[in-house]
């Protein structure tokens, strides 16, 4: 048995990209219409290894909610039969996940190096952070705010024209490893900042009066793993004592009603909240940086995918934040801006009621630290491709999202506190 394991390990190490293939794996969309069907899905999930794409866990499923999940090839027939037997409404969103994953790289842009319209691996993103700062010293500087569990540097870009006591907006991407469109947006944002400064009136005004702290990838170890081993990885890559399961969900690892709802205490689960708040080096580095700069950071934006939503606190409770009306108004206007470009439809609202309750998120934590403009973006799409969004959608996704981000930033600039 050990010999076999060793062989597998050796083969995996030298294997080409992606030791795990998703051939024949399907993504189902199921709509349970009553508690009985929800209960059936719970039973199904406890008997078959199911990867929930949206919502993130079975515990969040309610009647009339659309549920997207991935099923391994050898289980697809059984799952489909059971759904039909029980009369549960379903459709197959993705018939063969590997085909869709292969088609992700559909951009006709030919590039070997870093490219804004392609998905870039960590090596390329890391080099890009150095290059963009070196080439735009008047607008961009790079610092390191910590290291990941596996020792990779957590780079942070400060984007803005230098000036005294400027307020700032913090934006991060790449919390969840498989949400590749997220880091793509952080890179796009920085590109647009340096390319349109001096020509775009709004961008120029924003950069003259505000600094943007941009963290291009928070969960670097996980992101690397999605490129080398397993495209559908979500969590960090830290080890868990007493368990062979790897990783913590970084967006359940913050000290905001930590692990009280919508999170798991089991290390093998995708929404594992970690051994304690900020148990992850990555989340602690982010939280430490924000705490250290609380007097200047006036807005917090975090980029996720997918489902086309703009969310604000709270996620850990159905209670509404003190400035709910203001956050709702900002969101409505930001979404209107976003939609104006390509007609992409977004929903918006307080997290718990708009999607589902979940504790330990970075947005709720930042809000409770006193950052009253705190938003989570769930970028494209609505499930047609899900996490396997093709590269041809990077440009339109980033262009429309930029409009919303600029709107929010401008609002914050006009309402500094």
Image: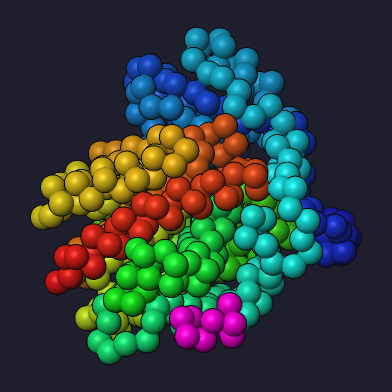
Tag count in the figure? 0
| Rendering quarter of residue 79 | top right
Percent across and percent down for residue 353 are 25, 39
**Quadrant into which the C terminus falls:** bottom left
Q: Is residue 64 left or right of residue 333?
A: right
- Name the foreground residue: 95 vs 50: 95
- Name the foreground residue: 28 vs 341: 341
- Name the foreground residue: 259 vs 213: 213
**Residue 141 in the image: above or below residue 310:** below
Q: Is residue 335 left or right of residue 72?
A: left
**Residue 272 in the image: above or below residue 169:** above
Residue drawn at (43%, 27%), measured in percent from left and top?
66
The span picked out in magenta is 132-144
Percent across and percent down for residue 318 are 19, 44
- Name the foreground residue: 198 vs 45: 198
Residue drawn at (39%, 45%), measured in percent from left and top?
338
Percent across and percent down for residue 87 are 50, 10
């Amino acid at each position: 048995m050990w010999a076999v394991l060793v062989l597998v390990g050796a083969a995996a190490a030298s294997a080409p990209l992606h030791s795990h293939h998703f051939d024949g794996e399907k993504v189902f969309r199921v709509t349970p219409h009553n508690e009985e069907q929800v209960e059936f899905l719970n039973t199904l999930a406890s008997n078959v290894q199911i990867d929930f794409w949206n919502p993130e866990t079975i515990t969040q499923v309610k009647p009339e909610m659309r549920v997207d999940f991935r099923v391994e090839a050898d289980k697809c027939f059984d799952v489909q039969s059971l759904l039909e037997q029980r009369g549960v409404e379903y459709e197959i969103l993705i018939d063969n996940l590997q085909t869709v994953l292969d088609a992700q790289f559909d951009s006709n842009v030919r590039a070997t190096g870093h490219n804004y319209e392609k998905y870039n691996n960590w090596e390329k993103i890391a080099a890009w952070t150095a290059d963009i700062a070196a080439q735009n010293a008047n607008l961009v500087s790079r610092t390191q705010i910590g290291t990941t569990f596996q020792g990779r540097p957590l780079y942070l870009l400060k984007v803005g024209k230098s000036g005294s006591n400027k307020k700032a907006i913090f934006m991060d991407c790449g919390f969840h490893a498989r949400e590749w469109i997220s880091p793509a947006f952080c890179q796009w944002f920085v590109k647009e900042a340096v390319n349109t400064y001096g020509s775009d009136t709004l961008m120029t005004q924003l950069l003259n009066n505000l600094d943007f702290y941009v963290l291009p990838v928070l969960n670097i170890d996980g992101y690397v793993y999605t490129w080398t081993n397993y495209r559908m990885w979500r969590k960090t890559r830290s080890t868990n004592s007493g368990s062979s399961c790897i990783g913590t969900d970084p967006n359940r690892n913050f000290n905001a009603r930590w692990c009280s709802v919508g999170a798991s205490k089991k290390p093998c689960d995708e929404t594992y909240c970690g051994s304690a708040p900020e148990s992850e080096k990555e989340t602690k580095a982010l939280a430490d940086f924000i705490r250290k700069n609380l007097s200047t950071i006036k807005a917090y934006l975090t980029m996720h995918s997918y489902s086309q939503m703009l969310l604000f606190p709270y996620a850990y409770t159905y209670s509404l934040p003190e400035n709910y009306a203001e956050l709702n108004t900002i969101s409505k206007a930001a979404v209107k801006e976003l939609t104006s470009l390509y007609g992409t439809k977004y929903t918006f609202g307080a997290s718990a009621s708009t999607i589902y309750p979940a504790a330990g998120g970075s947005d709720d934590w930042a809000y409770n630290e006193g950052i009253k403009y705190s938003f989570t973006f769930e970028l494209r799409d609505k499930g047609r491709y899900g996490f396997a969004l093709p590269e041809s959608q990077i440009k339109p996704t980033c262009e429309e999202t930029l409009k919303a981000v600029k709107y929010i930033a401008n609002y914050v600039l006009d309402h500094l506190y």
